[in-house]
Image (spheres, rainbow, N blue to C red):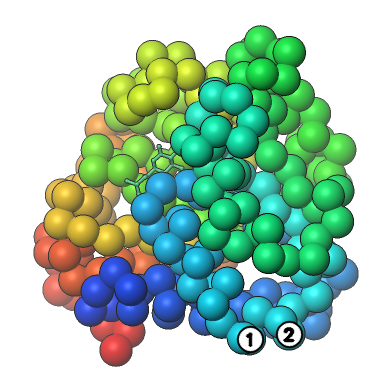
Amino acid sequence: MTNERRVLVHPDKSTLAGAVAARFITKTLDLLDAQPVVHIVLTGGSMGSAVLEAVASSPARMSIDWSRVHFWWGDERWVPAGHADRNDRQSHDALLDDLELPASNLHPFPASDSGLSLDEGAAAYAAELAEHAADGLAHPVFDITFLGVGPDGHIASLFPHRSGISVTDQTVIAVRESPKPPPERLSLTRPVINSSQRVWMVLAGADKASALGLALAGASRDEVPVAGIKGRRRTVFFVDRDAAAEVPEALIARDY
Ligand SMILES: O=C1O[C@H](COP(=O)(O)O)[C@@H](O)[C@H](O)[C@H]1O
């Protein structure tokens, strides 16, 4: 099995969301056959929510024993708990509120009204990761990490030409002066994301085409952070036709 980055193209955003949701359900079932617990990292943004909504509308989701699935987030906006801008709120609205999940399976980042400072919030999430760490690591080994990709190529809250994408000695960073609002955020770092067994990036729309094209053409991670992302076993870009416009034909596998 090779771990080359793969690009799977779907005709449009809604087909894309449905296909990723179906694959997620199947993969989670397979994983739960083989191991006691599955750790998933969720993302916010347009496609993160669209995929979860598609999971919520699939009857097949009922075959999953969700009590054995843990949910984490790749990044979070530093706003109060329950705020519409929070990635975890979007995940709850799209799917999580419909699932029977023990609260201990949910691992949201702290919120700005938690009483913690931004730096303390980063430290608290690092401690939460450490509590569930795999042997010899400071965090769980994530089975599937979902990422959205911004038009500038950012993933999680790791932005172009910022130091965050190069941090290797922390699991979680506090982000200030984010180029995308809100300015303060918390984010997993690249080594944590890249230690995931599978990284599934989901992106749709013409505004993502340039970032994806540059990342696959060998741009630096400083210029286009998504270029620095690679899971341990699988790294897949699930995209729609518009986002695939600048992907070299040789790299494309059409999923329809
Ligand atoms: O701010 C963020 O943006 C990205 C991408 O969002 P999109 O709406 O352009 O798809 C998201 O993946 C990230 O988690 C989030 O905090």
Whether residue 69 is visible here, answered yes or no, is yes
The quarter of the displayed image where residue 82 is located: top right
Q: Nearer the viewer, residue 110 or 186?
A: 110
Q: Position of residue 80 (x, y in %)?
A: 60, 25
Q: Position of residue 30 (x, y in %)?
A: 70, 82
**Label 2: which secondary element:** helix
Residue tagged 2: 63
Mark 1: is the Cβ under 8 angstroms from ligand 1?
Answer: no
Crowding around mark 1 (Cα neighbors within 10 Å: few <14, some 14 to 19, many 20+) is some
Q: Nearer the viewer, residue 256 or 83?
A: 83
User: Ligand 1 falls in which quarter?
Assistant: top left
**Label 1: which secondary element:** helix
CB atoms of marks 1 and 2 within 8 Å: yes
- Marks 1 and 2, Cα distance to the nearest angstrom? 6 Å
The quarter of the displayed image where residue 114 is located: top right
The quarter of the displayed image where residue 137 is located: top right
Crowding around mark 2 (Cα neighbors within 10 Å: few <14, some 14 to 19, many 20+) is few
For residue 233, above or below residue 170: below
Residue shown at 68% from the left, 65% from the top: 98
Residue tagged 1: 60
For residue 95, side relative to residue 246 (left or right): right
For residue 55, side relative to residue 129 (left or right): left
Mark 2: is the Cβ under 8 angstroms from ligand 1?
Answer: no
- Position of the C terminus by quadrant: bottom left
Residue shown at 54% from the left, 77% from the top: 57
Residue shown at 67% from the left, 47% from the top: 72
Q: Nearer the viewer, residue 154 or 84?
A: 84
Whether residue 142 is visible here, answered yes or no, is no
Q: Which residue type carries mark 2?
A: Ser
Q: Position of residue 251 (x, y in %)?
A: 24, 71
Q: Which numbered dot is residue 10?
A: none
Q: Which residue type carries mark 1?
A: Ala
